[in-house]
Amino acid sequence: MVIAIIAILIGLLLPAVQKVREAAARTTCSNNLKQLSLAIHNYAGTNGDKLPPLRITLNAATASTSDSTSTSGQASALTGLLPYVEQDALYRAHMAAGDVTVNKGIVVKTFQCPSDDTYGTGVGPNGWAGSCYAVNSLLLATAGWFNVTNVSQPKYSIGNIPDGTSNTVAIAERKMLTETSVTCSRDMPILWTGQDQYYSASIGEYQTTYPSYWATSNWWYSSQSIQPGVVGTTGVRWGANSAHPATVQLGMADGSVRGVNQSTNILTFWLAVMPADGQVLPADWN
């Protein structure tokens, strides 16, 4: 009898405990996005108002000049934000070596959402560490519907985003591993560092290959669907998504953090991702 009562009590208390844990995890995730959004501002503040590029150059001698090709001498926007999230030593190690593979397996806590259960230890295939967040490629490069150009030179500065910083997504949640299978390249995790993924750690563009090593530099393509979704390890592959119940959190270009839910129209979300559509965000955004 006593055992049965204890079992009932555990059954009643467990959902409440899970809710408390998720609330704490969501707060941590929000704080990460806040730090990353502010890191973009701080980058601009020390670089003449310029936004961080989608692809940064570690070694000009080995870097590719092609928008669609990259080398170990190039890295992603997340790598460029390292000095602004208390990871200056890691950034300097990459720059000094001129090679993004240096310290590729180091897990950066600010790049990790505690609710994302897809990343395990935080280190993906081939020893690359991952990210649960992705930057907006439409903001940090010159973008079209199916491609981006000028990946090393953003079209906008922090002071001239046409739709305004408060109306433009800068960085979003995206589960590190977006599908259950990692047997083909398109299904591999979001890894923060690596020469072939500046566009893996981004949202906003059509992606035909695998998701995101956090520091690699050849992934600007990033959403086969731009729909924000609370999904498992299947579904929307490369759009913004999260492990939080009913919410995807976004870091805006003004440094604020907000959530959108599944009732938000896909067009509304797309307007918030595009920095120069010139339209007022619909009512379901507010």
Image (cartoon, rainbow, N blue to C red):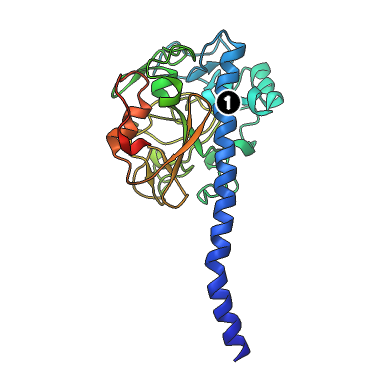
Residue 93 rendering spot, x and y as whole percentages: 69, 22
- Location of residue 44 by image quarter: top right
- Say which amino acid is labelled 1: Leu
Image vertical order of residue 82 relative to residue 107, above or below = above
Residue count near mark 1 (Cα–Cα under 10 Å), binned few <14, some 14–19, many ≥20 = many
Judge by depth and name the residue closer to the eye, 91 or 99: 91
Q: Residue at x 58, y 63 (%)?
A: 17
Judge by depth and name the residue closer to the eye, 161 or 177: 161
Q: Residue at x 55, y 40 (%)?
A: 30
Q: On the image, numbered disc 1 is attached to which residue?
A: 38
Whether residue 231 can be seen here: yes
Q: Residue at x 32, y 46 (%)?
A: 263
Q: Secondary structure under badge 1?
A: helix
Judge by depth and name the residue closer to the eye, 228 or 60: 228
Image vertical order of residue 230 relative to residue 111, above or below = below
- Location of residue 186 by image quarter: top left
Q: Residue at x 56, y 42 (%)?
A: 29
Residue 77 rendering spot, x and y as whole percentages: 52, 23
- Location of residue 155 by image quarter: top left
Residue 217 rendering spot, x and y as whole percentages: 49, 24
Looking at the rendered image, the quarter that the C terminus falls into is top left
